[in-house]
Image (tube, rainbow, N blue to C red):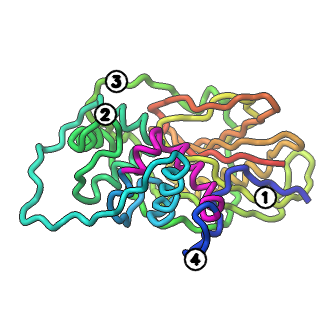
């Protein structure tokens, strides 16, 4: 029985007993530290900002506020930076006076470079009054103006459910060249979504399916998939495209993902690690691209405005 697992699994039991040494807690939080470091360009600067106040929200889709607070403490400790003492801002008698938000593409680009999930970050930043900037070289107003260019995303600080039931769906094989169009960024002030779709929430960190039949050898496997990374505006680049399928954009995120997982199980490559890039192409369809990653292959992310949202999963073993 073949088992598929992925090198970045963020479902780790957290120590909650204060008697444990910080180093032990940080050891358990390593998957979250990796995710934070991978999704935030300046993690030390951000964590100094994030720990300035008690937090109930997180700008990372798959890390809640409590876990991100602990991860940030570990990151600062690892870099020899003092951990700020959280301070609750005093109540103000009148709202803070700031200019009305105006889309500034310069700071939109800065936010996109600083956060792998810019829409989730902006949803977090807009959720309450802000007095500090989490991005070096940008003021609070700069961040507000940059976020004015980025379309809103409904987010939750709750960690998504651990498992997902896969519903097999018929799909159409597609070639890699048909999956997206890489459109250069234009000077348009506001990103206007062309295609609407039903987003039923973030995808699960872990997906399990049993007794999937491989289309090539008719053998039955069990699969366990864990999320590697997620974001928007980019797609996986590198490796060898093994197969691919597209699904209608009218499907909810979880429904399309369930179809992608079922497809990946049917076409998994025996003996060669598999990457799965699942993303929504603007004004098109959901795309499910299977990529072989032979030893020595280098994978990277290529920017593409046509990609609405993108997730990656990696097979191990």
Among numbered discs 2 and 3, the one appearing first in the sequence:
2
Left or right, 174 with reference to 231: right
How far apart marks 1 and 2 lie (CA) works out to: 45 Å
Q: Which residue is mark 1?
A: 223
Number of residues whose C-alpha sits closer than 10 Å to that of mark 4, classed few (under 14), some (14–19) or many (20 or more)? few
How far apart marks 2 and 3 lie (CA) works out to: 23 Å
| Quadrant hosting residue 203 | bottom right
Residue 167 included in the magenta stretch of the image: no
Among numbered discs 4 and 1, the one appearing first in the sequence:
4
137 to 169, vertically: above or below:
above
How far apart marks 1 and 3 lie (CA) works out to: 41 Å
On the question of residue 11 being in view, the answer is no
Asked if marks 4 and 1 touch (Cβ < 8 Å), the reply is: no
Residue 29 included in the magenta stretch of the image: yes
Over which residues does the magenta segment extend? 24-48
Q: Which residue is mark 3?
A: 186
Left or right, 150 with reference to 67: left
Q: Which residue is mark 2?
A: 137
User: Helix, strand, or loop for circle 1?
Assistant: strand
Residue at the (63%, 55%) spot, across then down = 30
Residue at the (85%, 51%) spot, across then down = 214
Report the magenta stretch's main SS. helix
Nearer the camera: disc 1 or disc 2: 2
Q: Which residue is mark 4?
A: 17
How far apart marks 4 and 2 lie (CA) works out to: 38 Å
On the question of residue 214 being in view, the answer is yes
Among numbered discs 4 and 2, the one appearing first in the sequence:
4
Q: Position of residue 55 (x, y in %)?
A: 37, 64
């Amino acid at each position: 029985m073949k088992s598929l697992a992925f090198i970045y699994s963020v479902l780790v039991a957290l120590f909650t007993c204060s008697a444990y040494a910080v180093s032990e807690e940080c050891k358990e939080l390593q998957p979250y530290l990796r995710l934070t470091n991978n999704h935030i360009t300046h993690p030390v600067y951000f964590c100094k900002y994030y720990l300035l106040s008690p937090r109930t929200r997180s700008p990372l889709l798959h890390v809640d506020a409590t876990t991100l607070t602990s991860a940030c403490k570990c990151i600062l400790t690892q870099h020899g930076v003092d951990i700020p003492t959280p301070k609750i801002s005093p109540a103000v008698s009148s709202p803070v006076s700031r200019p009305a938000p105006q889309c500034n593409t310069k700071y939109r680009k800065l936010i996109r470079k600083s956060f792998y999930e810019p829409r989730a970050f902006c949803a977090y930043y807009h959720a309450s009054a802000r007095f500090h900037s989490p991005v070096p070289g940008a003021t609070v107003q700069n961040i507000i103006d940059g976020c004015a260019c980025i379309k809103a995303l409904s987010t939750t600080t709750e960690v998504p459910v651990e498992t997902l039931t896969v519903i097999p769906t018929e799909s159409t094989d597609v070639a890699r060249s048909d999956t997206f169009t890489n459109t250069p960024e234009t000077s348009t002030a506001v990103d206007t979504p062309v295609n609407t779709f039903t987003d039923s929430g973030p995808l699960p960190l872990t997906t399990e399916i049993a007794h999937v039949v491989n289309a090539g050898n008719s053998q039955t496997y069990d699969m366990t998939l864990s999320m590697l990374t997620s974001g928007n505006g980019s797609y996986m680049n590198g490796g060898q495209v093994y197969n691919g399928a597209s699904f209608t954009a009218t499907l909810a995120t979880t429904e399309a993902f369930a179809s992608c997982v079922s497809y990946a199980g049917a076409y998994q490559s025996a003996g060669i690690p598999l990457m799965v890039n699942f993303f929504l192409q603007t004004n098109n369809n959901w795309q499910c691209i299977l990529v072989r990653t032979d030893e020595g292959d280098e994978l990277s992310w290529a920017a593409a405005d046509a990609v609405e949202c993108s997730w990656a999963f990696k097979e191990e073993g």
